[in-house]
Image (cartoon, rainbow, N blue to C red):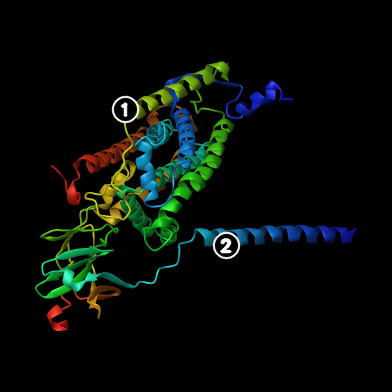
Amino acid sequence: MSEGTTRRKILVASAWGTLAGGTVLTARLVGAAIGPRPLPRRRLLAVGPARALAEGGVLRAGEVIVIHDERGIAAVSSRCTHLGCTVTVNARGFECPCHGSVFAMDGRVLQGPATGPLPWYEVLLGEDGELRVNLDRTVDPTARLDLREVR
Amino acid sequence: MSAPRSVRRSFFLHIHPERVRERTLDPRATLGLGVISVVLLGVLLVTGVALMFWYVPAPGAAYDRMVDLSGGALPLGGLIRDLHRLASDALVVVVVLHLARVYLMGALSRPRRLNWLVGLGLMLLVGATAFTGFLLPWDLEAYWAATVGGELIGLLPVLGQWMQGLFWGGARVGEDTLLRAFAFHVAALPLAGTVLLGYHLWRVRRSGGLAQAAAEPSSLVPTRPALTLRELILGLVVIAALLAAAVLWDAPLGLPGHPPRPIDPAKAPWFLLWIQELVSYSNTLGGLIPLLLLALLVLAPLAETQPELTGRWLAPGRRGRCIAMLVVLALIVALILVATYLRGPGWRLMI
């Protein structure tokens, strides 16, 4: 009698255990399937040959805007620090088309809702004459890659 | 051998009892909003399944398919898409009106507290399904809505970052985002919605049908044909109206969203424009106000301590909070109108 009761208890306990274990396993499996893909390793963003970007020129590549002014070449993020829209460039600076944030030419916030400035990235010139933006390293807004110096 | 008639009928009797209160027949009691919602869901299901036979959830291909659909590659394909979009827009409006109707009539006191919450959950599911559906054509509007939407989700407390990863499928919007929007739109959200809707309808019946004032005399009438006929007519009117509108109106399609380019201004789907308007002042405003409103809706049944006020439009004891709700709804509509018609390039006011 007591043996039967014990057997039943063991069976019921293992049933619960299987259910609990199965639930955890299912949650893990589903979680792995629906979780975000791992972060891509940020690389150097190739933006084209340096000679293609004349002084006074502006070009867009990925999430950066590369400018060439009288002091040299610099790259600023084109991703609005508010909610990620791509800013437009005009004479005043940069403007967000989604919520109206305005940034000065050096990336400072002139008008909200954005609260942080647009970051500037290091620009590198390769042996091959190709410009690359190092998205892993932010620099001061005044920093420039001086082509005359490089040459 | 087919099942006896009584058994076949009893399946539908789970939705409707054999007899209903006479009041249920009065269009002024419910405005038919719940029935309209269910009819719209039916239209969405049929047109949605048809669209799935055509759609490809990949950037580029998704857009091309939409162009082909409207360009006549599929007989009446454009009409199917128009109907799907119209029914979706209509459903968003109707579920909000349904929520307002239930509130203004005080039909959220015991024993309807739980069903009020289930209804709120259904409303959020409708919103999420409409939003993910808006992304599927993957035009530029969709791309930027996915970007801004994901950023906003990421700002939510506690689960925000996790939900952002779940939605984007990566650190940024990409092809995984579209695939996920598709999976949410055609499977995960409708599945959850179907289960919740079944429970919602069952709870209405369990709570004794339509809420009504205790003092009101309740004479019962047979459900068939009085109520079923009225529901059938309402359903046919809704479908006829949708068809007429779909012939006259074309579902919008922006510029291709792959590869992404900026658009100016970039506007959210219309039912989220009030949040975009708030967020353009500050994230705190745009985040806190919708969350606060949701919290108030969740807690609303706690204020309903007098069941005798149930079943009447703007009952004297509840008039204040009913008016407050109408004011909030009017403000939301006003913000949507401002964002739709008065916001131009750089999100500047055009007045």
Q: Nearer the viewer, residue A110 or B262?
A: B262
Q: Whole-percent x and y of residue B170?
A: 41, 62
Q: Look at the image and tell me whether residue B135 can be seen.
A: no
Work out which quarter of the rendered image holds the N terminus of chain B and state it: top right
Give the quarter of the figure containing the C terminus of chain B.
top left
Label 2 sits on a secondary structure element that is: helix
Between B121 and B138, the residue placed more toward the observer is B138
The quadrant holding residue A56 is bottom left
* Crowding near the residue tagged with mark 2, few <14, some 14–19, many ≥20 C-alpha atoms within 10 Å: few
Amino acid type at mark 1: Leu
> Looking at the image, is B294 positioned above or below residue B305?
below
Contact, CB < 8 Å: mark 1 with mark 2?
Answer: no
Gap in Å between the C-alphas at discs 1 and 2? 49 Å
Q: Residues within 10 Å of mark 1 (few under 14, many from 20)?
A: few
Q: Position of residue B240 (x, y in %)?
A: 41, 23
Q: Which mark is residue A47?
A: none
Q: Nearer the viewer, residue B289 or A98?
A: A98
Residue type marked 2: Arg
Q: Position of residue B127 (x, y in %)?
A: 41, 43
Which residue is denoted by mark 2 in the rendering? A28
Q: Which residue is mark 1?
A: B248
The nearer-to-camera label among 1 and 2 is: 1
Please give left or right for residue B251 compared with residue B204 in the image: left
Left or right placement of residue B227 versus residue B332 in this view: right
Residue B157 image offset from top left, x and y in percent? 40, 59
Taking B52 as reference, is A26 above or below it?
below
